[in-house]
Image: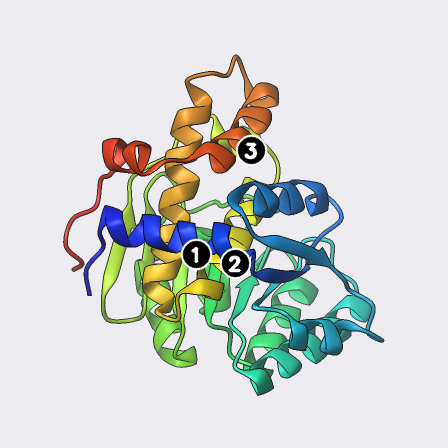
Amino acid sequence: MKLTVKGLFNDLQKIRDNAPLVHNITNFVVMNNTANALLAIGASPVMAHAAEEVAEMSSLSAALVINIGTLNREWVEAMALAMTAAQSKGIPIIFDPVGAGATAFRTQSCLTLINQVAPTVIRGNASEIMALAGCSVRTKGVDSSATQSDAEGAARALANKYACVVTVSGAIDLITDGNKKFQVRNGNPMMPKVTGLGCSATALVGAFCAVNDNAIIAATHAMTVMGICGEIAAKQSAGPGTLQVHLIDAFYNLTNEQIDSHWTHQEPK
């Protein structure tokens, strides 16, 4: 299992060539950001959260992205229906436990969903991943109060429990299947100042899982693209406002040469 510039660009080209449909049940704050990120990378986004249609929409999609950011009971029910439909069709499910650990309702909703249908990939910050694993940690709203190194044990435990890939976002992203792990060292300190970039990263994981059934490679490719494009965008940006604009352009224009020049990966551990 090896990461290469060629492998990443091949996945990116598959997304651009095939425009996989990525079904998002995501939060009100990031719907526009997420849709634009997916469009720019080459995927086809759809945002549908009504219980009456989510199962049908998921069945038509190449990947399902579940993001609990603006949570309510009706959405949890719709998410469960969508996840069940996706699982029955063998469609990858990407789960973002936004704010897990902040409130009992939020944490329990996440656990109810993933205990019912195990995701293909769970992507969250360190506090969220630790909360799902039952660690004593308090999420600061939707922000992490822990580092990705703090969460490695929790990430491995979750990955083994649910037979999935767990991605912990941070200054250094950690991606593990419970055995192997990759680290992504790309990105820029300005990125956490833009709301919803973690949610956009989750959506990109969905796009890459739609074209690559090796979930740990797909997730690492997505996080690498997110970090590299963040670096490219930051060089042109005066602050977080322009970073958002330049990031979408960076997704759209990303080349093999840019990936190669920003590549930081080593062999998995």
Q: Is residue 140 shown to the viewer in this render?
A: no
Query: Of helix, strand and loop, which one carries label 2?
Result: helix
Query: Of helix, strand and loop, which one carries label 1?
Result: helix
- Name the quadrant of the N terminus: bottom left
Q: Mark 2 points at which residue?
A: 18
Picture residue at 49% right of the left edge, 45% below the top: 144
Q: Earlier in the sequence, mark 1 or mark 3?
A: 1
Query: Of helix, strand and loop, which one carries label 3?
Result: helix
Q: Which mark is residue 4?
A: none
Q: Is residue 255 left or right of residue 53?
A: left
Q: Which of 180 and 50 is in front in this view?
A: 50
Question: At label 1, which amino acid type do we have?
Answer: Lys
Can you give x and y, in whole percent of width and height, for residue 61 in the image?
62, 69
Is 58 rendered above or below residue 200?
Answer: below
Q: In this view, does 129 lie to the left or right of 151?
A: right
Q: Is residue 263 left or right of residue 78?
A: left
Can you give x and y, in whole percent of width and height, for residue 2 in the image?
19, 60
Q: Nearer the viewer, residue 254 or 204?
A: 254
Q: Which mark is residue 248?
A: 3
Callout 2 crowding tier (Cα within 10 Å): few <14, some 14–19, many ≥20: few
Judge depth for marks 2 and 3 and give the one in front: 2
Q: Quote the CA–CA distance across marks 2 and 3.
A: 19 Å
